[in-house]
Image (cartoon, rainbow, N blue to C red):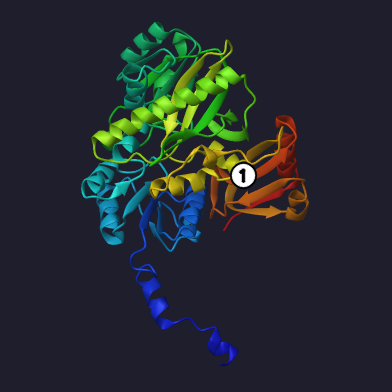
Amino acid sequence: MSDATSHQIDPSISKQREYGNPLVPDNTRVLLLGSGELGREVAIELMRLGVWVCAADSYAGAPAAQFAHENRVLDMTNPVALQALIDEVKPNIIVPEVEAIATSQLAAAARSGIQVTPSSDIAAICMDRERLRVLAHEVLGLPTTPYRFAQSLEELQSGAEQVGYPCVVKPIMSSSGHGQSVVRDSESIVDAWNEAQTGRRAAENGEISKVIVEALVPLDYELTVLTISSSAGIVTCAPIGQRQESGDYRESWQPAAMPSEILKDACSLAKQAVQGLVDEANTKGEFGWGVFGVELFVLTDGTLLFNEVSPRPHDTGMVTLVSQRLSEFALHARAILGIPVTDSDVSINLAKGQVACSRAIVVTGEGQAVFSNLPAALAVEDSELRIFNKPEIHGHRRMAVALSIGSSESDARAKSAEILDTLTISTTDK
């Protein structure tokens, strides 16, 4: 057989791919809603386990769409468009990887027998700060900052007086610090209300967004505890330290240095939060399986407070790509497929005393990002670079992550900073 003939694709396989059928008809079919850098890693881990994946997002060329068996572009907040996609793909499992999704259709999918990860109800609760805070504090009894909810400027002014200044004002429907303000005195409360209304997640018919006002507590540092719910129960990874800018992740490291008592309490609090969510899912006949990113505050006196929880792999958890035996993405894939996840699966894969670090590489500009000087950047000892290959930038966007392992937290963070400093990054209009 000639070389030309030997490299031809079997026409039957080509046709199967064209029509979107898995090569093995009985393969589990997953619809990934959200195809960014976190979704990409989830898609890869699912595909490694023989799962057929369709990656959907609001723009073409999203990172996971570059790897998945098929991809779609749509407005996932549009219930009609989302339902049409579900009807077309016919998934066994829907995996939401972003919050901007029509949750009503997730609930409808769950009622029709499709597994939603971790559950349709959990997805709705976690994207609504009011529902999440009421469940965490008033139902589960978890410690939180003092807070009030406000539906109007007048209610916000009253709530701010009750929790005291300085305080933080956030829309109940937003993420990554959008619409959030720190308010130092009553004269700034109007600006905070307006910021919350413009920065919140889009609402229909221009309706007013309810806000939460919280006391500004004496924060020492923040933690993320990756918590996995699976058919084997609930386990936690080693807590992850982090640094944010304007409410958005910039650095994370694992394991985070802290007293053993805080470590124990952080894992316990995270388990309580996730167990409460899983119990809610179970009452609706859903599993509640998957990775949860539980965000905690550690105050200057050592007090731990629950902040929020993300019902999916967490951006600070990108450090687990080099710190753990199984990354948060591999753990997520196993859990949602019904594979038991135990304490041995979440173990740290570092030598004694070592710390791993991730550093977000945020690029500012317009057009496409161009990375140069990679040989020097990749020469940094015990370090890696993951470029997300997002198609374009408008303003600023997370475009890559530097990963490193060091003999200490400061050493690991210095190595990831060296990668960023060594890279040459430019933008160019398309």
* Number of numbered markers: 1
Up-down relation of residue 80 to residue 187 (above or below) = below
Percent position (x, y) of residue 423? 72, 48
Secondary structure of the residue carrying tag 1 is strand
Q: On the image, numbered disc 1 is attached to which residue?
A: 363
| Residue found 40% across the figure and 25% down from its top | 272
Give residue 86's quadrant in the image.
bottom left
Image coordinates of residue 166 in percent, x first then y, are: 49, 11
Depth check, front residue: 382 or 341: 341
195 or 45, nearer to the observer: 45
Q: Residue at x 57, y 55 (%)?
A: 389
73 or 49: nearer the viewer: 49
Residue 188 visible in this rendered orientation of the protein = yes
Which residue lies at the image location 72% right of the left edge and 44% below the top edge?
Answer: 419
Most distant residue in the bottom direction: 1
Location of residue 183 in the rendering, given as x and y in whole percent from the top left corner: 48, 15
The picture quadrant where one finds residue 1 is bottom right
Pick whichever, 320 or 172, lies toward us.
320
Q: Quadrant of residue 130?
A: top left
Spot occupied by residue 387 in the image (x, y as percentages of width and height): 61, 52
Q: Is residue 409 above or below residue 120?
A: above
Q: Amino acid at mark 1?
A: Val
- Can the viewer see residue 62 in this picture? no
Residue drawn 40% across the image and 11% down it: 160
Image quadrant for the C terminus?
A: bottom right
Q: Horizontally, is 420 left or right of 51 in the view?
A: right
In the displayed structure, does residue 98 sit left or right of residue 219?
A: left
